[in-house]
Amino acid sequence: MPGKSLTVVVTRRLPEVVETRMKELFNVELREDDTPLGVDQLADAMQRADVLVSTITDQIDAKLLGRAGERLKLIANYGAGVDNIDVATARQRGIHVSNTPGVVTEDTADMVMALILAVTRRMSEGLRLAQSDEWAGWSPTAMLGGRLRGRRLGILGMGRIGQAVAKRAAAFGVQVHYHNRRRLRPEVEEALDATYWESLDQMVARVDILSVNCPHTPSTFHLINARRLKLMKPDAVIVNTSRGEVIDENALTRMLRAGEIAGAGLDVFERGHAINPRLKELPNAILLPHMGSATLEGRVEMGEKVIVNIKTFADGHRPPDLVVPAML
């Protein structure tokens, strides 16, 4: 199946260099604007596409897959996470799903450390004060945050990103602890100087900083629920750059308001861009618009992986980043 005979439909705007390369290789339909497609628009795209290049804003469930055309054989997701796609149903319908793993690791780990620093040193509050007319100058007791060195960091999810966070945290003198579905190999654990906790409850109760780096799956939905949030120290902070659904956002908001958790740095939210209005009002919450992987280099690398997956599939081979239900 030569690439030019494939109809590739892209659901969002991609970096110009990626779109240019796609036009060279495939018969591609690109977007002129950058708004998410509606359900009917997605269904229409899936009717006429051999390959759909989706993003995390495209919710492709079993019902929508039932409206796909016979031509659709590959959903090449532009992103590492595939919780927006019903992979099992896609496979049952003979539709392969690929993703772009590993690309966002360094960029997201950088953002985790940025948020940890920003929350513990109260940078958001300081920024608002400096830009207001209320700042009266330096004071020995003003804007006191906390020192990172010596603190305990608990990493929930010790995959690529979690391990990259652990390496960065060590440079700040932070003690690394982690909880994972599977314990790391002894040599990896030793190299990271990381302490494994089989019990998430016990780890959450003992760390000063909790970083959420696990994917969203049925088993991780509200993994950090009200009960576990109450186990955290009152002076602890929580950072989430993974998926908003992992944390019970309403419970977190209540505890931040009550001072039962010192602060939060969130790049993702339970309901996408519909952030809890009460959360927005909190001075001890730093909120970012899903910027964790937002570097030009990372976005171009993601596009290159999508192209390789499509090209390999067009050549009659297994895409290198094929996703199967057993991986989830």
Image (cartoon, grey):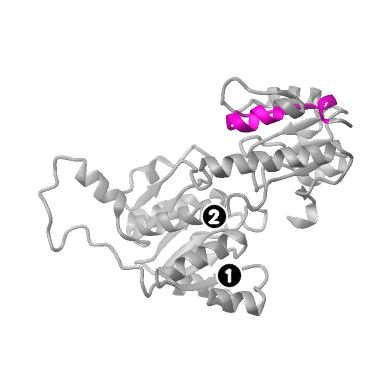
**Mark 2 secondary-structure assignment:** helix
Q: Position of residue 10 (x, y in %)?
A: 69, 28
Position of residue 237 relative to residue 37, above or below, is: below
Q: Nearer the viewer, residue 212 or 320?
A: 320
Q: Is residue 286 left or right of residue 268?
A: left
**Mark 1 secondary-structure assignment:** strand
Q: Nearer the viewer, residue 150 or 229?
A: 150
Front: mark 2 or 1: 2
Question: Given contact means CB atoms under 8 Å apart, are the residues at marks 2 and 1 in contact?
Answer: no
Q: CA distance from mark 2 to mark 1?
A: 20 Å
Q: Identify the image quadrant of residue 174.
A: bottom left
- Look at the image and tell me whether residue 272 can be seen: yes
Q: Residue at x 54, y 62 (%)?
A: 164
Q: Position of residue 209 (x, y in %)?
A: 43, 66
Q: Nearer the viewer, residue 140 or 1?
A: 1
Mark 2 crowdedness (10 Å alpha carbons): few <14, some 14-19, many ≥20: some
Residue occupied by mark 2: 106
**Amino acid at pointer 2:** Glu
**Amino acid at pointer 1:** His
Q: Identify the image quadrant of residue 301.
A: top right
Position of residue 132 relative to residue 257, above or below, is: above
Asked if residue 13 lies in the magenta stretch, the reply is yes
Asked if residue 147 lies in the magenta stretch, the reply is no
Q: Position of residue 181 (x, y in %)?
A: 66, 67
Mark 1 crowdedness (10 Å alpha carbons): few <14, some 14-19, many ≥20: many
Q: Is residue 174 left or right of residue 165?
A: left
Which corner quadrant holds the C terminus? Answer: bottom right
Residue occupied by mark 1: 179
- Look at the image and tell me whether residue 197 can be seen: no
Q: Position of residue 32 (x, y in %)?
A: 60, 20
Q: Residue at x 58, y 79 (%)?
A: 190
Instruction: Tell me where the magenta segment starts and ends, as one range.
Output: 3-22
